[in-house]
């Protein structure tokens, strides 16, 4: 089993973030307080800490001809799970920064990817490979 990661992020509005991560992304909620909430993001622990004064400054870098926001975070999924998530996000009306597509076609590391922002402006990327084990770190 791969070890789950723990990531704590700032959010402007905890209630809005609970809705987005729970209802839109489908994350189950764990422990919480009036200032933070633990979420199960595909088996990883994501903690949203409320900071009503937070400022998000996203930079962008070029990857395979697309402008992608940095910093960003997400999960590498199996291809079927990625397709289910992409369809779920589209059905929920999520605005994509980078629409779901395949990048690095025919090259080592060919992958499905998509980017979007949460309500606080945190950038997320979810990606998938036909064979994660051989392609995730392919050169």
Image: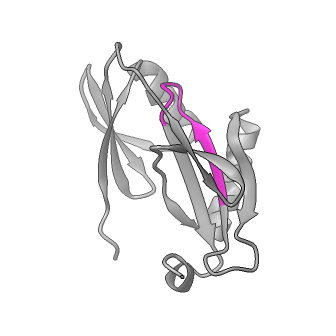
Look at 24% across and 25% down and name the residue there: 33
User: Does residue 114 show up magenta in the picture?
Assistant: yes
Residue 31 vs 12, above or below: the answer is: below
Residue 68 vs 135, above or below: the answer is: above
Q: How many marks?
A: 0
Q: Position of residue 71 (x, y in %)?
A: 45, 44
- In the image: residue 9, left or right of residue 111: left
Look at 68% across and 61% down and name the residue there: 64
Residue 52 appears in the rendering: yes
Q: Position of residue 46 (x, y in %)?
A: 35, 45
Look at 28% across and 28% down and name the residue there: 36
**What range is drawn magenta here?**
113-122
User: Does residue 75 show up magenta in the picture?
Assistant: no
Residue 93 falls in image quadrant: top right
- In the image: residue 35, left or right of residue 85: left
Q: Residue furthest bottom?
A: 134
Residue 22 appears in the rendering: no
Q: How is the image coloured?
A: one colour
In the foreground, 116 or 62: 62
Residue 34 vs 129, above or below: the answer is: above
Q: Position of residue 31 (x, y in %)?
A: 26, 37
Q: Position of residue 3 (x, y in %)?
A: 29, 68
Look at 48% across and 34% down and name the residue there: 122
In the foreground, 95 or 29: 95
């Amino acid at each position: 089993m791969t070890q789950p990661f723990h990531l704590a992020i700032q959010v402007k509005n905890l209630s809005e973030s609970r809705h987005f991560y729970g209802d839109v992304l489908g994350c189950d909620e764990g422990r919480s307080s009036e200032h933070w909430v633990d979420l199960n993001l595909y088996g990883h622990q994501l903690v949203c800490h409320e900071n009503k004064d937070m400022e998000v400054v996203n930079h962008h870098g070029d990857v395979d001809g697309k402008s992608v926001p940095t910093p960003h975070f997400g999960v590498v999924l199996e291809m079927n799970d990625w397709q289910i998530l992409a369809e779920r996000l589209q059905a929920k009306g999520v605005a994509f920064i980078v629409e779901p597509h395949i990048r690095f076609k025919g090259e080592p590391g060919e992958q499905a990817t998509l980017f979007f922002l949460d309500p606080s402006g945190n950038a997320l990327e979810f990606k998938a490979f036909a064979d994660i084990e051989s392609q995730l770190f392919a050169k």
